[in-house]
Image (cartoon, coloured by chain):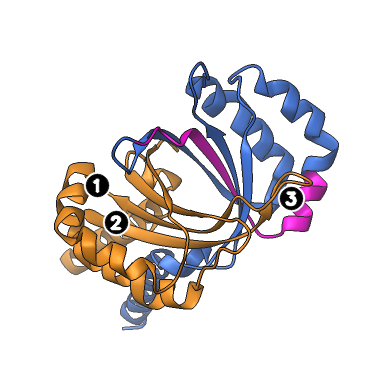
Chain colours: A blue, B orange
Amino acid sequence: MKRKLFLTLLLVTTFFAAFSQDKPAAEKGLIKISVMYPFSEGKTFNMEYYEAKHMPMVAKFLGTNLVKYTIEKGLSSGMPNQPLPYMAIGTFYVKSLSEYQAAISPNRDAIRADFANYTNVAPVILVSEVVK
Amino acid sequence: MKRKLFLTLLLVTTFFAAFSQDKPAAEKGLIKISVMYPFSEGKTFNMEYYEAKHMPMVAKFLGTNLVKYTIEKGLSSGMPNQPLPYMAIGTFYVKSLSEYQAAISPNRDAIRADFANYTNVAPVILVSEVVK
């Protein structure tokens, strides 16, 4: 009888853990740093290098302040007859902007020096807050 | 003995479900439609209306093709002495771009008519694919 109660409790806890992970509000309040690479004639972007080398390098600098990072590849403009706005966007989701800045600051030269290995365009950077 | 086996299997399945939800690759391959509202002098954006009315309206048009949507509020440029690139970004994560377009097309006028209720700037739209 005791074992059955234990197993039931364990099941309930596990189900609860499963569902709470699925909550869409998990990212609310986090700071996003979006590094956006504008598209224009003659501009290039090497996604393989970016994914395999550049982003993991920056992620390592950020340590436990980094909740996750994402990479997206620009496909098209959502408006007819408009050019593709960005070739790629890399986004860091962090808990603290000041910790992010403190971690990036001493490594800025290394990060910038790596740009030439995958792109010939200067990125636009947006700092934003996850509202939903 | 049979019940114990059943409970064990159920536990294993539930744990597996819990961990698979936590995988960062869950969004890989999805299509993102990012609606980005550029900042410039005199431009306004009503985040409360956008979150409470506009985004839920569009989300409803998208049905089960919509995996999730997010809203972020622009805080600053990540570069010193650069203006804020975007005041806000709303993003739809969908399974199919063609289904998205088919769902939006008959509702485009309603969506555009609602713009005036929260902003005086025309958005830039990026269609991208989640790489990581």
User: In the displayed structure, does residue B98 sit left or right of residue B36?
Assistant: left
Tell me the residue at 24%/47% (across/down). B95
In the foreground, A35 or A60:
A35
* Cα–Cα span, label 2 and label 1: 7 Å
Amino acid type at mark 3: Tyr
Local crowd at mark 3 within 10 Å, few (<14), some, or many (≥20)?
many
In the foreground, B72 or B15:
B72
Q: Picture quarter containing residue B16? A: bottom left
Tell me the residue at 85%/37% (across/down). A106
Measured as percent of width and height from the top left, residue B69 is found at 37, 60
The numbered disc on residue B95 is 1
Local crowd at mark 1 within 10 Å, few (<14), some, or many (≥20)?
some
Amino acid type at mark 2: Val
Based on the picture, tell me whether residue B98 belongs to the magenta stretch: no
| Same-chain check, marks 1 and 3 | no
User: In the displayed structure, does residue B13 sit left or right of residue A112?
Assistant: left
Q: Picture quarter containing residue B86? A: bottom right
Q: Chain of mark 3?
A: A
Element under disc 3: helix
Element under disc 1: loop
Say if residue A15 shows up in the picture: no
Measured as percent of width and height from the top left, residue A22 is found at 38, 64
The numbered disc on residue B67 is 2
- In contact (CB < 8 Å): disc 2 and disc 1: yes
Segment colored magenta? A82-103
Q: Which residue is mark 3?
A: A100
